Image (cartoon, rainbow, N blue to C red):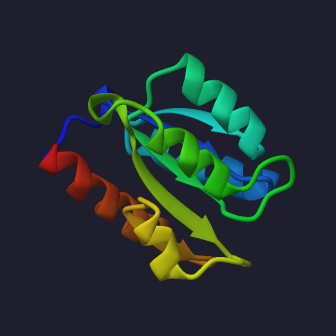
Amino acid sequence: MIERNKYTVLIVDDEPDILELMEEEFNYYGYQTMTADCGVDAIEKIRSHKFDVVVSDYKMPNGNGMLVLEEVNSMATNLRPEFFFVSGQADISIKDALDAGAKEFFSKPFDLDDLINVIEKELSLK
């Protein structure tokens, strides 16, 4: 079992209700969280904070999830957070997202417990 309070998750989504729900769920499980409501905001936060995990919507105004993933991919390997897409209207195939470096792609609606279980599996491998 991992020590969840040691990990910080950046949650990126332009839908306020989904953003709030995911933040509450990650906090409930003991993770530290920050949120961003668009890709540009997420990139600014990634540049100024250390994250262990980024969970990002794909299709958003002001910078889509692929731009956020490109920022993550530009980081030094030892500083790079694990990246997960969550999206309901992606203009990208799951294969393309995984090929670009995402660990997993969850289609909305999805089970938050499943997302957290996959994230914990990835964190335990680090």
**Residue under the image location 65 percent in, 34 percent down:** 43
In the picture, measured across the screen, residue 59 lies left or right of residue 108, that is right
**Residue under the image location 77 percent in, 45 percent down:** 38
**Residue under the image location 68 percent in, 26 percent down:** 44
In the picture, measured across the screen, residue 35 lies left or right of residue 5, that is right
In this rendering, does residue 126 appear at all? yes
Q: Say above or below: 60 vs 99.
A: above
In the picture, measured across the screen, residue 78 lies left or right of residue 57, that is left
Q: Nearer the viewer, residue 62 or 4?
A: 62
The location of residue 86, given as percent across then percent down, is 58, 66
Image quadrant where residue 104 sits: bottom left
Q: Say above or below: 60 vs 73.
A: below
Q: Say above or below: 36 vs 1.
A: above
The location of residue 75, given as percent across then percent down, is 43, 32
In this rendering, does residue 111 appear at all? no
Q: Nearer the viewer, residue 65 or 111?
A: 65
How many numbered marks does the figure carry?
0
The location of residue 82, given as percent across then percent down, is 37, 47
**Residue under the image location 76 percent in, 37 percent down:** 40
Find the residue positioned furthest to the right.
61
Placement of the C terminus among the 4 image quadrants:
top left
Q: Nearer the viewer, residue 21 or 74?
A: 74
Find the residue positioned furthest to the top.
48
The location of residue 23, given as percent across then percent down, is 58, 44
